[in-house]
Amino acid sequence: MAGPLDGVDAVAMTITVFGLVIDASEAVVDDELPLADLMQGEFVDVELSAAALPALVATEIEINGDDD
C-alpha cells in the first residue's frame, strides 16, 4: 500500500494511511528510523503482513522518494 501519511501515533505504535489505522509495532521503518520521526503528509510505501489479514499489520514502512 502506498500513500500519504495521515498520522502517526508513536505511543500506540500505529500509522494512518488513507484513513486506515495500521499496526506498526513490528514494522521495520526506513533506515530503522524511530516511528515518531515519520511526519504527516510524507508519502510512504507500507508492506502489510498477509498472515495477519484482515488486520492491517505493517512489516515494512519506507518513505517514498528516499534514495537510500
Image (cartoon, grey):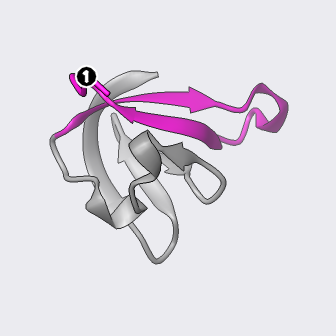
Residue at image location 79% in from the left, 38% down from the top: 52
User: Is 43 left or right of 15, judged from the image as shown?
Assistant: left
Q: Residue reaching furthest front?
A: 68
- The kind of residue on which mark 1 rests is Asp
**Residue 67, image x and y in percent?**
25, 22
Q: Does the magenta stretch include residue 63?
A: yes
Q: In this view, does 24 lie above or below 59?
A: below
Q: Pointer 1: what residue?
A: 67
Residue at image location 19% in from the left, 50% down from the top: 40
- Residue 63 visible: yes
**Residue 2, image x and y in percent?**
38, 22
Region in magenta = 42-68
Residue at image location 38% in from the left, 48% down from the top: 16
**Residue 13, image x and y in percent?**
51, 65
Quadrant housing residue 54:
top right
Q: In this view, does 66 lie above or below 39?
A: above
Q: Does the magenta stretch include residue 8?
A: no
**Residue 14, image x and y in percent?**
49, 59
> Who is closer to the viewer here, 43 or 37?
37
> Who is closer to the viewer here, 49 or 55?
49
Quadrant housing residue 31:
top left
Q: What element carries label 1?
A: loop
For the C terminus, give its image quadrant. top left
